[in-house]
Amino acid sequence: MPVFSANLSMMYKEHEFLDRFAAAARDGFRFVEYLFPYDFDAGEIADRLKSAGITQSLFNLPPGDWDKGERGIAALPGREHEFAQGLEKALSYAEATGCKRLHVMAGRMPLDAQQRVKISDADRSAMRKTYLTNVKRAAQACAAHGITTLIEPINTRDIPGYFLNYQQDAHDMVAELGETNLKVQMDFYHVQIMEGDIEMRLRKHFANVGHVQIAGVPKRNEPDIGEVNFPYLFGVLDQLGYTGHVGCEYNPRAGTSDNLGWIKPYLK
């Protein structure tokens, strides 16, 4: 049976962030994740985790200037020093919270006024080289702390211009870098939007899948509505012997606790 992790950046928004840990625990979650912890003291987050009796599954490295639309800087040439500083900051939070998975966000390619990618082949190649260099650096630094480093293909509807969009590309990069603690974060929501055929892609790449996430498609609400048969996919994860966490990275239709009927059988 899958082990679920509540994403506190998207779920439980009816509570202040630091109160979401206890709210998730009351609903039966034993693991949580979120996008970024950096607006809060690492020790305070650690205290909330301990008080709620839950474990931190995952968070992301600093994304750059989120308010200005940046969604990661790992693939952005010229930002290597900033990336290295962000990596050190993320590791300090991981140490304080006991988190064993860190996601390295790639960033966005340049867009024109119509939100279409506008980049030369040479610049795209430079971004890939920068991304691989930074991801390798992150993986090696994380390895010293027993942490798994993750990269994630993200759909171009939610983040136009995001540098990494397809499972095969991500797994090719993992193979190219050859770091044993580098894995792919496979979000079924993004897979369905970009390429579909979720089960076959999961089976093909399973050995290097380090974390799974879910959300209903197409609206990113609870996974009990939409076009994807999640109970079936949970069975596939069990069949494959998946022992990691399944992150619930979705926007609740209303109050989080009132709309957890889909997951109650799994939280017993």
Image: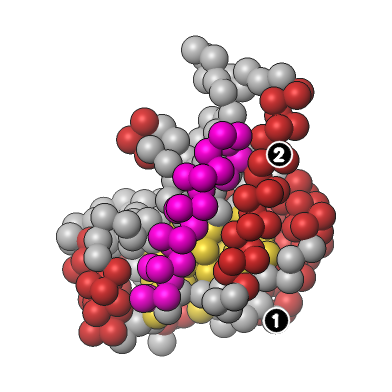
Instruction: Categorize mark 2 by other alpha carbons within 10 Å: few (<14), some (14-19), many (20+).
Output: many
Q: Quickly name the residue at label 1.
A: 241
Q: CA distance from mark 2 to mark 1?
A: 32 Å
- Which residue type carries mark 2? Arg
**Taking 46 as reference, is 93 left or right?**
right
Look at 69% across and 25% down and name the residue there: 123
Q: Position of residue 27 (x, y in %)?
A: 29, 77
In the displayed structure, 106 sits above or below 142; it is above
Q: Quickly name the residue at label 2.
A: 128
In the displayed structure, 74 sits above or below 224; it is above
**Taking 188 as reference, is 46 left or right?**
left
Look at 76% across and 23% down and name the residue there: 121
**Taking 172 as reference, is 54 left or right?**
left
Q: Position of residue 187 (x, y in %)?
A: 58, 56
Main secondary structure found in the magenta portion: helix
SS assignment at label 2: helix
Of residue 180 and residue 255, the one placed in the foreground of this image is: 180
The mark that comes first in sequence, 2 or 1, is 2
The quadrant in which residue 139 appears is: bottom right
Indicate the quadrant containing the C terminus: top left, top right, bottom left or bottom right: bottom left
In the displayed structure, 139 sits above or below 74; it is below
Q: Position of residue 214 (x, y in %)?
A: 52, 59
Look at 24% across and 65% down and name the residue there: 41
Q: Is 87 part of what is drawn in magenta?
A: yes
| Residues shaded magenta | 74-97
The quadrant in which residue 80 appears is: top right
Residue 264 seen in render: no
Indicate the quadrant containing the N terminus: top left, top right, bottom left or bottom right: bottom right
